[in-house]
Image: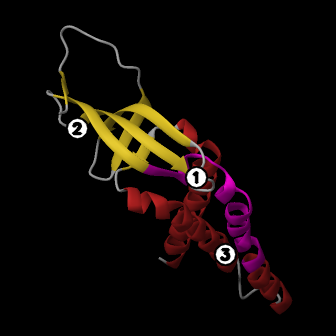
Amino acid sequence: MFRLFTNTLKFFCIAFIIWFAVYFLLGDRFSIYFTDRVFASYFPEILVFLTAASIYGLFILAIKSSYKKWQNILLFIGGFLFALTPFLAYHGYFQYQCDFWNQEIKEEKTIYFNSQNKFETVKVIQSVCGTDNSEIKLDTVFSKQFTPYFEMQNPVKIQKVENADWTVVK
């Protein structure tokens, strides 16, 4: 039972570390966003903390009573030092990049909605970089909410169509 518990913990720790890497290195290639903008602004910091705790947890789980005392102390201290890596990466590099995790949405306006599916809309999003507020970016996106917490957003160009299910929001 203990072995199953430790293997499950190791799996979750590795999953959080992979999630951190994919989110910050490849995250702009995915079109899935949080619908709650307040939570979306805190999520990178939560993910950094979970990754650091996961790295430290993997080192703690590697401590064995059969090892010499100095080896366990090295694992304990080494785990703490390696757990600083996500914090240093985020606060030293990622935090100052103007990528999707640092975009602060100033205004979001729905211009069209689908009369057949209420979860599909076309929005104009005005965002500004969280590090320097000088550059304002306007995007027209197709948004499809697929759960109460997540939505897919893809860039769209608006074209006039005769028979469409899209209605203009007034």
Which part of the image, by quadrant, shows the C terminus? top left
Query: Which label sits in the foreground, 3 or 1?
Result: 1
Circle 3/circle 1 CB separation < 8 Å? no
Disc 1 residue type (three-letter): Asn
Q: Kindly identify which residue carries mark 2.
A: 119
Of mark 2 and mark 3, the one earlier in the sequence is: 3
Sequence-first tag of 3 and 1: 3
Quick check: is 169 in the magenta stretch? no
Q: Is residue 57 left or right of residue 9?
A: right
Give the alpha-carbon distance from disc 1 to disc 2, as whole Å: 31 Å
Q: Residue furthest bottom?
A: 69
- Percent across and percent down for residue 97 are 67, 51
Q: Which mark is residue 67?
A: none
Dot 2: element: loop
Q: Are marks 2 and 3 in contact (CB under 8 Å)?
A: no
Question: Residue flagged by tag 3: what amino acid is it?
Answer: Tyr
- Kindly state the secondary structure of the residue where label 1 is placed: loop
Q: Can you see residue 80?
A: yes
Report x, y in % for residue 160.
Answer: 29, 11
Mark 3 crowdedness (10 Å alpha carbons): few <14, some 14-19, many ≥20: many
Residue drawn where x is 71% and y is 83% of the image = 64
Q: Which mark is residue 56?
A: 3
